[in-house]
């Protein structure tokens, strides 16, 4: 049973559009929610992260929205560019145990 | 800056063979992790080591063993490889300071025939 559920599995967006990826969880012990970006042949790299006491965090074109009551969080990529084409993973950490659980990934294709 | 280095990058094994995947980090991180990545399943935690001298099971530990050799190195061993262990394996490390991210290596692509 997957601890973090991610959707959609794949996403096609036109250049300049908004890409939205959603994640949901049940475990209220999660205390840190990072998003990772992965290019083919490479390991995941941290993109942006949020704590549950914050409802939104923005870094450049990337924004995390967090809804603690609904146990959902999402990644928004504004003005999507072809260079953003990659696989994106959401994750959640169980703080006391230093363990991370990952979503199943979303493959984003931004068309020129 | 090497970060997290994994060796080998590619390997093909026959069923029943054994193999050790190596991982080393140069960031003085306390915590290290082994994940496997399979299509449509994201990254699943095999084992992790919160600090030197400790190891704990993750979500999918069966068929694997680990050794935290020292603070820098964390190895993953397949004693008797099975086709179901065909996957891409990632090692990661992390500082134990609050809200620090994991840093990943570029993976080992392992095929078991």
Image (cartoon, rainbow, N blue to C red):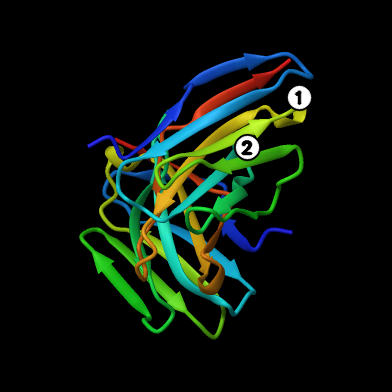
Mark 1, residue position: B83
N-terminal of the pair, mark 1 or mark 2, is: 2
User: Is residue B48 something that shows in the picture?
Assistant: yes
Q: Nearer the viewer, residue A48 or B100?
A: B100
What percent of the width, then of the height, locates residue A43? 42, 38
Q: In which quarter of the image is the N terminus of chain B?
A: top left
Mark 2, residue position: B38
Q: Mark 1 against mark 2, which lies toward the viewer?
A: 1
What percent of the width, then of the height, locates residue B31? 45, 55
Q: Identify the residue shown where x is 48% and y is 41%.
A: B91
Q: Is residue B72 depicted above or below A22 in this figure? A: above
Q: Identify the residue shown where x is 64% and y is 45%.
A: B41
Label 1: state its secondary structure: helix
Is the residue marked by circle 2 packed among few (<14), some (14-19), or many (20+) residues within 10 Å? some
Q: Quadrant of residue A23?
A: bottom right
Q: Residues at badges 1 and 2 in contact (C-beta under 8 Å)?
A: no
Q: Nearer the viewer, residue A42 or A63?
A: A42
Q: In this view, does B113 lie to the left or right of A36?
A: right
What percent of the width, then of the height, locates residue B61? 71, 46
Chain ID at mark 2: B
Q: Quadrant of residue A61?
A: bottom left
User: Is residue A40 something that shows in the picture?
Assistant: no
Q: Which of A96 and A47 is in front in this view?
A: A96
Distance from the alpha carbon under mark 1 to that under mark 2: 13 Å
Q: Identify the residue shown where x is 74% and y is 25%.
A: B81
Q: Which of A39 and B19 is in front in this view?
A: B19
């Amino acid at each position: 049973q997957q601890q973090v559920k991610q959707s959609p599995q794949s996403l096609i967006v036109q250049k300049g559009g908004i890409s939205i990826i959603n994640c949901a969880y049940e475990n209220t012990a999660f205390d840190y929610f990072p998003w990772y970006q992965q290019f083919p042949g490479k390991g995941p790299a941290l993109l942006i992260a949020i704590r549950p006491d914050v409802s939104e965090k923005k870094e450049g074109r990337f924004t995390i929205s967090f809804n603690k009551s609904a146990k959902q969080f999402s990644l928004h990529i504004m003005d999507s560019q072809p260079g953003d084409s990659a696989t994106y993973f959401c994750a959640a950490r169980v703080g006391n145990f230093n363990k991370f659980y990952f979503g199943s990934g979303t493959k984003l294709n931004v068309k020129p | 800056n090497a970060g997290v280095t994994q060796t080998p990058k590619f390997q093909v094994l026959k069923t029943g063979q054994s193999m050790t995947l190596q991982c080393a980090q140069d960031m003085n991180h306390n915590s290290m992790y082994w994940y496997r990545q399979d299509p449509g399943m994201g990254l699943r935690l095999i084992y992790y080591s919160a600090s030197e001298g400790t190891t704990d099971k993750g979500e999918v530990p069966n068929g694997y063993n680990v050794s935290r050799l020292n603070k820098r190195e964390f190895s993953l061993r397949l004693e008797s490889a099975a086709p179901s262990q065909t996957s891409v394996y990632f090692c990661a490390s992390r500082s134990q300071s609050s809200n620090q991210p994991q840093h990943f290596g570029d993976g080992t692509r392992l095929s078991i025939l």
